[in-house]
Amino acid sequence: MAFELTKEYVEKLALAAENRDTETVRTDLSELFAADISVVLKELDGPQAHYVLTQLDTEKGAEVLAEYEPDDRRELLRYFDSGEIARYVNILDSDDAVDLLKEQPIRIREEVIALVEDREQARFILDLLPYEPDTAGGLMQKELVRINVRQTVTECVEEIRRQAQDVEKVYTVYVIDDDETLLGIVSLKDIILAKRGSRIEQVYNQDVIYASTYDPAENVAELMRRYDLDALPVVNVQKRLLGQITIDDVVDVITEQAQEDIAAITGVSEEVEEDDSVWKITRSRLPWLGIGMIGSLMAAKFLGIFEHDLLLMVPALALFIPIIGSTGGNVGIQSSSFMVQILSDKSGISGGELWPRMLKILSVSVLKGLLIAVFVFLVTFLLLAHPLKLAMVVSISLLGVVLLSSFTGTVTPILLDRFGVNPSVASGPFITTANDFLGYSVYFGIADLLYHL
Amino acid sequence: MAFELTKEYVEKLALAAENRDTETVRTDLSELFAADISVVLKELDGPQAHYVLTQLDTEKGAEVLAEYEPDDRRELLRYFDSGEIARYVNILDSDDAVDLLKEQPIRIREEVIALVEDREQARFILDLLPYEPDTAGGLMQKELVRINVRQTVTECVEEIRRQAQDVEKVYTVYVIDDDETLLGIVSLKDIILAKRGSRIEQVYNQDVIYASTYDPAENVAELMRRYDLDALPVVNVQKRLLGQITIDDVVDVITEQAQEDIAAITGVSEEVEEDDSVWKITRSRLPWLGIGMIGSLMAAKFLGIFEHDLLLMVPALALFIPIIGSTGGNVGIQSSSFMVQILSDKSGISGGELWPRMLKILSVSVLKGLLIAVFVFLVTFLLLAHPLKLAMVVSISLLGVVLLSSFTGTVTPILLDRFGVNPSVASGPFITTANDFLGYSVYFGIADLLYHL
């Protein structure tokens, strides 16, 4: 069902753009949805994409621009003059218009706003510009349908007819009083079902969930997910209705959050895509690898202390360096991802009872550590036939490593979260490397102790 | 704005439930949304939760059940008899009803279906039961508003009035012909804006995106995300309209997918929550740790080959075991997560051009490997003052390890994807352990070669 992009299609379109062949361009794109056109245009070079986009009617062109990724859009719009951009900004939803303008240099941004024909739209944009992108204010659009509580359902339908021209999708009608205070909502379905003569007062729903402009985007996403909302009104401190957030924007927030978490865990520092340059892709991975390198080189320096002593006396100690390293890493990742899950789940009992929770996490790690230690002791001593002393050093160290990595894996996400850093970073290479290092210290510490008894 | 659950609140409610104090229970819960009541009930024991739920009116009770996690719901419903369950199933949306019934033992499932009063609902449920949960068929609900293309807008409004009683949220009206073939859609907004006398034919939109019953859930999510849809119609091979999928269900799919990916990467095999038992939490982590253990013990066995030879001759070789292990792991995770991202992005050019893509991935790894090798050579030889030969062994091995782990990290997700396994698993402990092992082989292989020249 989804549109499939082929190389032939792109080549044909690129050729038509080069030849300024309006007819072919229009016919080729007429059947496509805006989201698909944006995918096609990404395959063309800047001047070609500029030509193609200007051949579409302005409304469709604006839709296409709304579908672009920020980086690609900034790149594309370098080929447009301020007047052209203003024509699209004029009819975009105000939230999309602001996103687009925030990507532009300030000079161009101001030129474009001055050129926007619809003065209400320009006012909307100026209202929205100050909000931080990752807050409810940064996600909201000004377009919405509102109705005064003292009106009737018949008047409401008229009002919807009048206002709905500017609103792309009408999910809900917001009920306000004379001061524009949000009182409640009434769904389109309720309006259609209501008797024509009834008053809004009689049919509207006062149980309304709303966000404040400064609420973080992730809380907005959680609210809309938990209460299955299609649209969420945004109010200021006086509960005055300022805008609404629609579910499609929040779906994007949820998707991006998940990608960020995975990038943090897998240690990719910069967002890259397949068609980025070899150097950009390589660069995005170097910082984390570099941290890993430096950590491991420090470990090498540290282990060097034992090179002419323990390692010469018991070379077999080297054989278990891998198991110490990987156990520390794996246990740390598991503990931290569990903690991240707990931190992100805001539906449970809030605060309180820190000690019982910590005790439980401790029990899990003791149990896990004992099981691992006993298993590895048996394999090392009985199956691999290493001396008793070595088997003891390895298994006692593993118990220590499990306890230690569980501790760091649990505490680090809490600290990161408190300092406003994405706690998923705690599952990334930085903490893993630190855990490895801790593990080797425990291992050689215990070996030193037992072999010099 | 969101509801905050406190311990005092739960204790008060539990006491009221014990004392069969209907008045307090009803007053306490009257202001809460269904999603919040489900959070409260999870804190009570089974019989208490059963009592509280039966004190709510059936409609609210059904909403609360729809908000439950599958495991918790199965646990809770053990305290309900089939007649009680049937009353809720009777009014749930058909997709939620089927989810609930699929969690029940077959005997109870059949009893409940037989007891459902609304025979249309029972038929809906029997229609939906056969579909796999992770497909469009498994996500869809039968409730929707449809209108014949030959009717007028006025008739459509009447039809919506009639049908909307059963449909919780009306997003879109589906336009069909006499054979129930899906022809297009018309939004509630369009209906409100249309002139009363117009015919559906004149106002409906033929560009409709739809899914087939067997489409995988992740494709459905991608379609709805890409085209910003609130509802997606589901058809059979003859394009007959069978049901619809609403955005709130898809938001849950996206959230769950992200959690699954992260669980796969961090090696947690079974979904656990904070309030699960110590044993269950421990158990969920053991399979992956076990694989790590066995891999590392095999590595120990393998390294044992060099214990009385290379390691005795050059004990310093042991110092760089950590850097070999962690580099293999980190590079493998980065490559595989990049590949997973490419595999999940279905919007780009499909198929074709395998070789240029592979060449690019190869270039990135060669560049990455060379940078790392040169850096580590300089640090080892100049800063840590190790012999030239050792520095060469370490840096050549690192180049080999980077190339090898990039290769496995790239190929494994493709193979897993082809065999229908979640490719994110490739970033998990299994592949990491395999990469470690490969890395040690390369390291000692090269050392063996250079030191026995």
Image (cartoon, coloured by chain):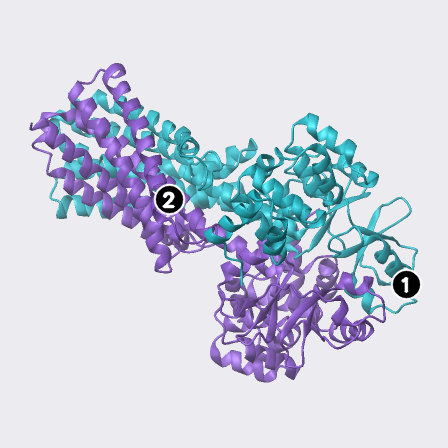
Chain colours: A purple, B cyan
For this rendering, which residue is in front, B131 or A151?
A151
Q: Is residue B15 left or right of residue A404?
A: right
For this rendering, which residue is in front, A265 or A350?
A350
Pointers 1 and 2 within a single chain: no
Give the residue drawn at x 57%, y 33%. B420
For this rendering, which residue is in front, A202 or B334?
A202
Which mark's residue is nearer the viewer, 1 or 2? 2
- Determine the CA span between mark 1 and mark 2: 60 Å
Chain of the residue that carries numbered disc 1 in the rendered image? B
The answer to whether residue B16 of the structure is visible from this angle is yes
**Residue where numbered disc 2 is placed:** A357
Q: Secondary structure at mark 1?
A: helix
> Number of labelled discs?
2
Residue B346 picture location, percent across and down = 59, 47
- Residue flagged by tag 2: what amino acid is it? Arg
Dividing the image into 4 quarters, which one contains the C terminus of chain B?
Answer: top left
Quadrant of residue B218 within the rendered picture = top right
Residue A58 picture location, percent across and down = 69, 71
Residue B407 picture location, percent across and down = 41, 37
Picture layout, residue A451 above or below residue B235: above
**Residue where numbered disc 1 is placed:** B154
